Structure formats: C-alpha cells, structure tokens
C-alpha cells in the first residue's frame, strides 16, 4: 500500500490480501472457495482475522469478492446499501427468502445497487475467476450480515457457528462458543415475513446500471450513477460517479472523503504535487480538502468509479 504524507492511500490490486473464512458459509460446499477482501473500513467480515488494508472511516466501506466459476455467496441481507460493480467475469445475482424471487446477470463493468432489506446472493457463472468491487453504506456497514436461516443450518453441519454477537467460531480449528455466549438465533417466521420479495421487473430497471450506458453518459463530465440525480435514484449515504476515457480531465476539491476504484485502463491522479498512476483493480482513498486532478494516463478504453461520502444517513435506501 502506498501511504502519502497528505493522507492519500493506494492499494494495488496485486497487493490485496484475501480472507477465505470471512463468513459463516465458507465451509459449506459451493461457497467454500470464495475470497473476501476488506479494502477501506472495517467491512462486514465475521472473522476477526480479516485483513483491513485501510482503516480510515470515510462514511462507507470498500471491499471486494473473488470467486472461481460456479462458486456462490449465500443468501443474506444488509441494513444499509450494498453496491457491486463487476471488475472481472460474469455474475448471476438472485434474491428472495429462497433465492427465487428474481435474478439478473451482470457482466464486465455493470453495477447493481442492491435494495436494502431483502435477501440476496450471487454466483460466478463465467468460465474464469471473477472479481466484484463492493461499496457498503456506513462506517460499520449497518451492523453486519443477516443470514437466511437455511444458511446458518448448513454452516453448522460443516463446523462453523456464529455467536449472538456476530463472531465466527470454527470447530475445525478447535474453537467453540465461549461459556455464557449463545449462537446467533435464526430469524423467526414473523421476522422473515418482513423481508420483501420483489420481482426482477421492479428491481432491475431501478437498481442496475449497465457499462455501456454509463460510458455513454460519461462525456464530457462524469456520469452520476447513484444519487438523487443519478441513473439510479437513491440516497445510500454516499454518491457514485463513473468516469471514462470520454470524460474530460477533472480538477477539483472535495469536502468529503473520496475513493477511486479503477475498472479498466490507467489513470493519473495528481494531489499536492505528487502523482499516482492507477491500474485496473487499484483503489485510491483521498481525504477531504485536497486539490486534485484526475485524468486518463494512457490512451484507450478506460473506466473508473468515484465514490464520495455525503451528509446523508447510511440507513435503508429509497424504494421505487
């Protein structure tokens, strides 16, 4: 990680450190090969051994998920926003109590701002290792993950238990729940009835942004993807823009934290006389109040997401 004196931090894609036991389903067949990355903020990992690359709290979390073909992430929910952008591969997202209420397939560069309060999962349906970049709302990402009851039940059969405080214990490592600490109770049927089951026709048009639509809208200024005036009209506690090789060079200051997530191409970031070249998969955190320039460094196709904090609360997102 590059750590500048002005507080700018860069995490290179090749330096990302995965956790392979971040969640309760990571011993369950079908989910046991996934990798979780916590890049900025504490994330939602249930394993205290999860490596955090940048501990700053910008008001949102940045992470990533890497999975080989056919590997899936089990049904879960969040109290705050969860946004995924496809860095590599082809992914099927599905949702509902049993994962059969609706689905959508995303490919390179597509983005899904998943509505809060519903169970969701995802699977790499491509032919190669895939990677998702993720943004989670809030400094504590809403207090963790809420699992569908069948996920907790399956995990128990493979040696993993979650405490009522949300900490993971692995019997394969000789771990067990401490005395006086109970397991995370599964949701009751009454609690489950509060989780919505929206159809694909109500979710996809309002919460999915396709790569080429974002590219088309990114000239001459960055395309607002998530925000009150964005392609996805929402207020998740942050704003998200897309910049491409069609976007004019940007020179500006920002009163909130900003994170740059490179999708493709190479980008030149200039801050207080120093310059960084960012490559695909790199992450750059810029503290508030610094003058900066952002431009494409090498001619050719280029794309980058820009995430900014704002003064909105990181609670449940708007519903359409």
Image (cartoon, helix red, strand yellow):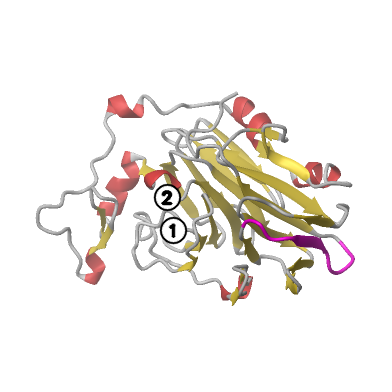
Q: Position of residue 312 (x, y in %)?
A: 55, 37
- Quarter of the picture containing the N terminus is bottom right
Q: Is residue 147 visible?
A: yes
| Residue at 40%, 66% in the rendered image | 50
Q: Nearer the viewer, residue 249 or 149?
A: 249
Q: Nearer the viewer, residue 101 or 118?
A: 118
| Residue at 55%, 63% in the rendered image | 68
Q: Is residue 292 left or right of residue 123?
A: right
Residue denoted by label 1: 42
* Kind of element beneath mark 1: loop
Labels 2 & 1 near each other (Cβ < 8 A)? yes
Highlighted range, magenta = 288-300
* Kind of element beneath mark 2: loop
Q: Main secondary structure of the magenta part?
A: loop
Q: Quadrant of residue 234?
A: top right
Q: Reply above or below: 137 against 192.
A: below
Q: Position of residue 190 (x, y in %)?
A: 29, 24
**Mark 2 or 1 closer to N-term?**
1
Please say whether residue 295 is one of the residues in the magenta stretch: yes
| Residue at 83%, 42% in the rendered image | 217
Q: Is residue 88 visible?
A: no
Q: Position of residue 43 (x, y in %)?
A: 45, 55
Q: Is residue 3 left or right of residue 189?
A: right
Please say whether residue 264 is one of the residues in the magenta stretch: no
| Residue at 80%, 47% in the rendered image | 222
Category of crowding for the residue at label 2, using alpha-carbon neighbours closer than 10 angstroms: few (below 14), some (14–19), many (at least 20): some
Residue denoted by label 2: 140
Q: Is residue 102 left or right of residue 157?
A: right
Q: Quadrant of residue 131?
A: bottom right
């Amino acid at each position: 990680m590059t750590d500048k004196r002005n507080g700018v931090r860069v995490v290179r894609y090749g330096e990302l450190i995965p956790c392979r036991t971040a969640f309760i389903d990571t011993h369950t067949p079908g989910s046991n090969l996934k990798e979780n990355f916590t890049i900025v903020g504490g994330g939602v990992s249930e394993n205290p051994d999860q490596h955090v690359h940048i501990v700053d709290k910008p008001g949102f979390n940045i992470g990533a998920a890497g999975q080989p073909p056919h590997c899936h992430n089990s049904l879960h929910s969040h109290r705050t926003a969860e946004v995924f952008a496809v860095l590599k591969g082809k992914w099927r997202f599905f949702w509902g109590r049993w994962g059969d209420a609706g689905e959508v397939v995303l490919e390179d560069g597509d983005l899904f701002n998943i509505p809060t309060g519903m169970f969701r999962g995802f699977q790499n349906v491509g032919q190669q290792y895939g990677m998702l970049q993720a943004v989670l709302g809030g400094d504590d990402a809403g207090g963790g993950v809420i699992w569908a009851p069948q996920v907790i039940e399956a995990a128990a059969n493979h040696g993993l238990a979650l405490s009522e405080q949300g900490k993971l214990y692995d019997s394969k490592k000789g771990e067990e729940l401490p005395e006086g600490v109970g397991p995370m109770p599964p949701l009751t049927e009454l609690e489950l009835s509060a989780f919505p089951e929206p159809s694909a026709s109500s979710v996809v048009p309002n919460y999915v942004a396709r790569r080429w639509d974002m590219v088309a809208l990114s000239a001459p200024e960055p395309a607002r993807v998530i925000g009150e005036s964005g392609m996805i009209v929402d207020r998740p506690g942050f704003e998200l823009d897309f910049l491409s090789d069609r976007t004019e060079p940007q020179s500006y200051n920002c009163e909130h934290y900003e994170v740059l997530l490179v999708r493709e191409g190479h980008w030149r970031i200039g801050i207080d006389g120093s310059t960084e070249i960012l490559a695909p998969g790199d992450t750059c955190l810029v503290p508030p109040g610094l003058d900066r320039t952002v431009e494409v460094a090498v001619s050719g196709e280029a794309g980058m997401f820009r995430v900014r904090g704002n003064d909105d609360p990181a609670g449940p997102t708007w519903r359409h």
